[in-house]
Image (spheres, rainbow, N blue to C red):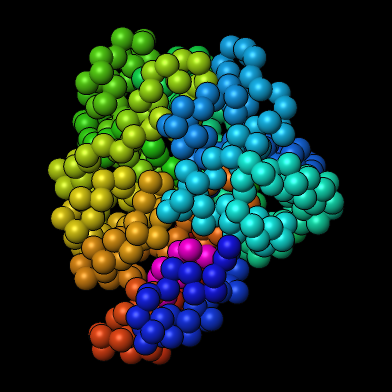
Amino acid sequence: MLHPDRLFPADPEIRAIARRLYAEVAGLPIISPHGHTDPRWFAEDRPFADPAALFVVPDHYVFRMLMSQGLRLEDLGVPRRDGGAVEPDPRKIWRAFASNWKLFRGTPSSLWLAHAFETLFGIVEKPSAENADRLYDVIAERLAQPSHRPRALFERFGIELLSTTESPLDDLRHHAAIRASGWKGRVITAYRPDPVVDPEHVGFLDNLAAFAEIAGVDVGTWDGYLEAHRRRRAYFKSFGATSTDHGHPSAATADLARAEAEALWATVRAGRATPAEAELFRAQMLTEMARLSLEDGLVMQIHPGAFRNHNADVFARFGADKGGDIPTRTDYVRALKPLLDRFGNERDLTIILFTLDETSYARELAPLAGHYPALKLGPAWWFHDSPEGMRRYREQVTETAGFYNTVGFNDDTRAFPSIPARHDVSRRVDCGFLARLVAEHRLDEDDARDVAVDLANRLVKAAYRL
């Protein structure tokens, strides 16, 4: 299923250049600085349970497509919030997936899955109703072998570093277990404070109580609340964290006077915040997080613009992260102005901006990142983590921001086997883009080779302070 020239330009001359550039980066180690894989996998190093548990049940890219064609999440084994019955037989779940393989034609999921099937299990035929059971048996047999346990795959994938993402309420016990085991794989964490920063987050007030307890500080005052963040950030840094991660509904920032911030915190802490006040509090906290990043050196990632849990019924029955987050239009120029007025010219601060709104690339994000020292532009992300999305990204941002105000690639995935596939797609697309610049005499090939290595390896290390 994997053609050696996949994703390279069709023009023979440009394709030949792309091949040469790709040969320079294909074998480089993978740096994965932003993702959502489970640290428990690497702490316990147990075999993955079965093909369905690895490829279908946890992957919202997979089951959202199947759901869009009428399959029930219960029949795909997706756990219900109320503990209600779902399909318990992984073989039946796998059959449903394999029988509907055609739904993934033309999608990045088909690239990622085909890469995993061929490179990990030697499968070179397309899944189907007819071969579903046979492919299931092949994968299940391999998963039971030591060569396919999480740590072995980590090493086989050539991962130099992988970052997970945890809440401030996480005690990081799995990261502690990884460290205590003596395993040499480098798995770090990232600080995702949304559950104790967003007044509209489910269970926010209960989260605050747990936050105070785990931080060992009274969050009843504004200063105490900020100190709790300071302590938790330091704890995360002790487990290798180099970044924070902020998934707000919008890119709004604010820079309130101290008295205003204290009054707003009192309202939020009392559970009386209106939607407008909740938005203002989130906005203020982005600025406060930038201030804390200047203190402790953590790189700040902001990825706004998702209407979370748009499908109310799915959210009610199955919870968050079930494929119902939908991109929205996002304003960056005005929304980020308060934060940038305060910190945009700080050379010791790095803020990486992501977007789900492609219309903002050339108009807003590339000009901002091409001007402010504190800003860098994150890669094509989520719905745009695709060959065409990556090409559009390079085409829209390079002329204004260049390559060196971007940060390479991150895979942002929960699907562990897709990590090498996603990085391979990114490297191929970037080499294709660079090859066109060479063929058009806009870049010489030596410079293109250097840029290709930067995009695959050096920029991410520099941006994330690795």
Instruction: Residue 220: name its quadrant.
Output: top left
Instruction: Residue 84: name its quadrant.
Output: top right
Give the vertical position of 409 relative to 101 (above or below): below
- Please give left or right for residue 52 compared with residue 400 in the image: right
- Please give left or right for residue 83 compared with residue 356 in the image: right
**Residue 318 magenta-highlighted:** no
Residue at x-position 82% and y-position 48%: 141
* Magenta stretch: dominant secondary structure: helix
Magenta stretch in the rendered image: 424-431
Along the viewing direction, whichever of 291 and 114 lies nearer the viewer: 114
Give the vertical position of 324 relative to 48 (above or below): above
Residue at x-position 54% and y-position 45%: 101
Q: Position of residue 202 (x, y in %)?
A: 44, 18
**Residue 430 magenta-highlighted:** yes
Along the viewing direction, whichever of 266 and 69 lies nearer the viewer: 69
Outermost residue toward the front? 130
Q: Position of residue 144 (x, y in %)?
A: 83, 46
Residue at x-position 52% and y-position 62%: 423
Along the viewing direction, whichever of 292 and 176 lies nearer the viewer: 176
Outermost residue toward the right? 145
Q: Position of residue 56 (x, y in %)?
A: 60, 38
Q: Position of residue 439 (x, y in %)?
A: 30, 86
- Please give left or right for residue 346 compared with residue 188 in the image: left
Quadrant containing the N terminus is bottom right
Residue at x-position 33% and y-position 64%: 391
- Please give left or right for residue 402 compared with residue 104 in the image: left
